[in-house]
Image: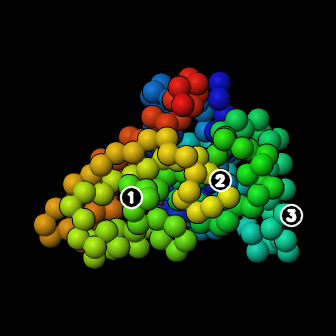
C-alpha cells in the first residue's frame, strides 16, 4: 500500500482528514510518518493519538538548505514513503529535496490558485486577502510541488462560496470543511490509483 509522509506545522486538521479516511477504509494509502519543524504543533499530537510515527526536524538545526533537504529526504525514503503531503507545512524545501521526490509531493492551498497564493500568502492571510478583494467565490487547490511557491501543476480544485458577514476565520473554516478535507484524501486516492 502507498505510504504517506505528511509534513505539518500547525493544527493538523488536514492530517486528521487523512487519518480518518484511512481508519474508515476510504484511503488507498496509509500515513507512515508525520514530520514537523515545530515541536508544539498539535498535528504531532494527532499522529501520536493514532499510533503514527511523529518526528520533529527543525530547519534551524541545519546550517545549509541542502543539509536539511538531505535529512528530510533520507527520513522519508527510509520509511518507504511514496507520496509526500504538505499539509500546512511552512519551511521551504529546496531543489535537492524536490528532485528526490519529483511529482511525488503535493500541497494543499486554501484558495483557487492562481488567486491569493505565492510567497507570504498562507494561513489566515489567504482568507483576509480574499475578503478584502471582495471575491464571491474562493476555494482550495491541491497541486504538485515544484521549486516555486504554489506554482506546480494543479491536481484538484473545489470552489466555496463567500457569504455576507464572513470573517477570515469563518471563511477559513468553511473552506476547510467544504473543500480541503474532501480534496486532499481524494487527491491521494487518485495518485494511489494512477489517475492523475
Ligand atoms: C490549511 O488551510 C492548508 O490549506 C494550508 O495550511 C492550513 C493547514 O491547516 N496549507 P491544518 O494544520 O491542516 O489544520
- Relative image position of residue 11 (x, y in whole percent): 48, 61
Image depth: mark 3 or mark 2 in front: 2
Which quarter of the figure has residue 157? top left
- Relative image position of residue 50 (x, y in whole percent): 56, 42
Which quarter of the figure has residue 162? bottom left
Image-based side of 41 in relation to 100, left or right: left
Image-based side of 61 in relation to 117, left or right: right
The N terminus lies in quadrant: top right
Q: Return the residue at label 2.
A: 146
Above/below status of 146 relative to 101: below
Above/below status of 23 relative to 121: above
Q: Residue at x 33, y 62 (%)?
A: 172
Q: Return the residue at label 3.
A: 67
Query: Would the CB of label 2 be found within 8 Å of ligand 1?
Result: no
Residue neighbourhood size for the residue with mark 3, other residues' Cα within 10 Å, grouped as few (<14), some (14–19), many (≥20): some
Q: Of the two numbered discs 3 and 2 on the same chain, state the one appearing first in sequence.
A: 3
Q: CA distance from mark 3 to mark 2?
A: 19 Å
Q: Is residue 28 visible?
A: no
Amino acid at each position: 500500500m502507498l505510504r504517506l509522509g505528511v509534513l505539518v506545522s500547525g493544527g493538523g486538521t488536514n492530517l486528521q482528514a487523512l487519518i480518518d479516511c484511512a481508519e474508515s477504509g476510504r484511503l488507498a494509502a496509509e500515513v507512515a510518518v508525520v514530520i514537523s519543524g515545530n515541536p508544539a504543533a498539535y498535528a504531532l499530537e494527532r499522529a501520536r493519538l493514532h499510533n503514527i510515527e511523529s518526528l520533529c526536524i527543525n530547519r534551524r538545526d541545519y546550517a545549509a538548505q541542502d543539509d536539511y533537504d538531505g535529512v528530510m529526504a533520507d527520513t522519508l525514503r527510509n520509511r518507504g514513503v511514496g507520496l509526500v503531503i504538505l499539509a500546512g507545512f511552512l519551511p521551504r524545501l529546496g531543489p535537492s529535496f524536490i528532485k528526490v521526490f519529483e511529482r511525488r509531493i503535493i500541497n494543499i492551498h486554501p484558495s483557487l490558485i492562481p488567486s491569493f497564493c505565492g510567497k507570504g500568502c498562507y494561513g489566515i492571510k489567504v482568507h483576509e486577502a480574499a475578503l478584502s478583494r471582495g471575491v464571491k467565490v474562493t476555494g482550495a487547490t491541491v497541486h504538485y510541488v515544484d521549486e516555486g511557491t504554489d506554482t506546480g501543476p494543479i491536481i484538484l480544485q473545489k470552489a466555496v462560496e463567500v457569504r455576507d458577514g464572513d470573517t477570515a476565520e469563518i471563511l477559513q473554516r468553511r473552506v476547510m470543511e467544504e473543500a480541503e478535507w474532501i480534496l486532499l484524501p481524494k487527491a491521494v486516492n487518485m495518485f494511489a490509483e494512477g489517475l492523475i
